[in-house]
């Protein structure tokens, strides 16, 4: 099974024009519409305030944003911020979160690779920086086992992805190309029918038989399995070391410039949250589910939560080379003009935090601020 081609370094290219993907590039999150639901954490009495009174952080009510869910739920982010208050907003789609960042409605966001690329290139490199990692994996190909037994059986079948040009759509188109099959990226027609379906309705589409399977993020994949689908492929198996970025941390360049101490505090909270999650997976899973219940009104049932949680790796590393490869896959599929991603990363604050914690530094794949 061919693995995606990864590219750690690329020469500068012209800034991309992205008319097609301006609305299509969503994060890996669940759903497609914004849902701003701001909350505020309690500040400890007498805690020292940093250079900003408040920091506003956006994330998705989704397990692939576990760092934010658990860090907020357990107070680990607020603890590092001291007297600076943490305010949170929830989103269901990458474009909405990027719009909020550009409109100065949030300062920092947890978000997927495609909207990060889109936001950076559309602003000609002026809107955001990626400052850290959060999660890897959590994407699966699940199918109707009565119709599809092997990967070769996908030919001629109808397979859903969340949205034209989104992270999973690009990955599936790349996989199809590696198989030697042909699909028109725009229409989704070809040797495989790629059906763009919102994650919220994909389970109903599967039950009705209008799709034969789906290449989707968690928890949608596990919801489909609970409805009778079978996991045929975990996307992580296609990547070197079984890792690829699904969620990273971005910051507005203005906020990074004006409040570096606050950014560093958020990254300390993120690193400590990730450490706690990885050391206490069962407690962390329960914490994330409690946060989901608070934000969405209901927790995930165990038959969905358990396999979904197991497939997601929590990491400080933004896995920059895999973001670069994902951008290249979108270019090859004809969904993206070749972007100039030089400067999209600023990992100096994160590496400072990691060094202080005795952890190894992470790399920017040659795409960092010079």
Image (spheres, grey):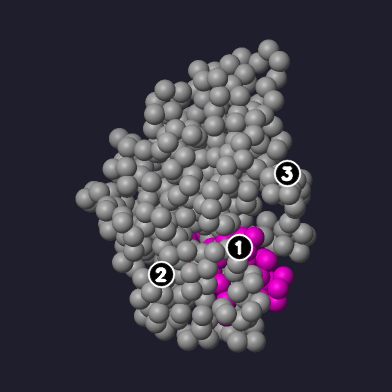
Residue sitting at the far top: 46
Q: To which quarter of the image does residue 83 belong?
A: top right
What residue does disc 3 label?
Answer: 294
Q: Residue 148, position in %: x, y?
A: 59, 85
- In the rendered view, does 364 fall on the left or right side of 212? left
Give me the C-alpha separation between circle 2 and circle 1.
24 Å
Sort mark 1 into few (<14), some (14-19) or many (20+) by Cα contacts within 10 Å.
Answer: few
Badge 1 marks a residue whose secondary structure is: loop
Residue 196 on the magenta span: no
Which residue is labeled 2 in the image?
A: 174
> Where residue 142 sits in the image (x, y, percent)?
60, 73
Q: What are the residue bounds of the magenta stretch? A: 212-241
Task: Indicate yes or no whether the magenta region holds residue 240.
Answer: yes
Nearer to me, 11 or 286: 286
Q: Which residue is mark 1?
A: 200
Q: How many marks?
A: 3
């Amino acid at each position: 099974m061919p693995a995606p081609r990864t590219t750690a370094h690329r020469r500068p290219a012209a800034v991309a024009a992205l008319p097609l993907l301006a609305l299509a590039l969503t994060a890996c999150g669940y759903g497609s519409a914004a849902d701003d639901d701001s909350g505020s954490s309690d500040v400890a009495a007498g805690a020292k305030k940093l250079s900003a009174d408040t920091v506003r952080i956006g994330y998705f009510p989704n397990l692939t944003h576990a760092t934010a869910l658990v860090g907020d739920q357990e107070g680990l982010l607020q603890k590092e911020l001291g007297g600076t208050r943490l305010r949170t907003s929830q989103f269901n789609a990458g474009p909405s979160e990027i719009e909020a960042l550009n409109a100065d409605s949030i300062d920092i966001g947890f978000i997927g690779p495609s909207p990060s690329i889109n936001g950076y290139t559309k602003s000609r490199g002026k809107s955001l920086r990626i400052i850290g990692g959060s999660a890897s994996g959590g994407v699966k190909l699940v199918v109707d086992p009565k119709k599809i037994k092997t990967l070769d059986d996908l030919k001629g079948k109808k397979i859903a992805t969340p949205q034209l040009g989104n992270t999973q759509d690009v990955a599936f188109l790349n996989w199809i190309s590696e198989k030697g099959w042909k699909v028109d990226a725009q229409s989704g027609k070809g040797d495989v029918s790629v059906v763009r379906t919102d994650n919220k309705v994909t389970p109903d589409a599967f039950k009705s038989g209008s799709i034969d399977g789906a290449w989707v993020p968690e928890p949608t994949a596990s919801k489909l399995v609970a409805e009778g689908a079978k996991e045929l492929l975990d996307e992580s198996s296609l990547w070197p070391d079984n890792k690829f970025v699904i969620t990273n941390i971005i910051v507005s360049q203005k906020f990074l410039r004006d409040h570096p101490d606050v950014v560093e505090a958020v990254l300390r909270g993120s690193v400590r949250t990730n450490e706690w999650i990885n050391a206490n997976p069962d407690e962390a899973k329960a914490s994330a589910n409690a946060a989901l219940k608070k934000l969405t009104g209901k927790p995930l049932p165990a038959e969905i939560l358990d396999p979904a949680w197991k497939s997601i790796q929590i990491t400080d590393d933004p896995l920059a080379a895999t973001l670069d490869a994902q951008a290249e896959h979108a270019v090859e599929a004809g969904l993206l003009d070749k972007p100039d991603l030089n400067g999209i990363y600023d990992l100096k604050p994160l590496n400072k935090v990691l060094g202080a914690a005795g952890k190894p530094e992470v790399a920017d794949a040659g795409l960092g601020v010079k």
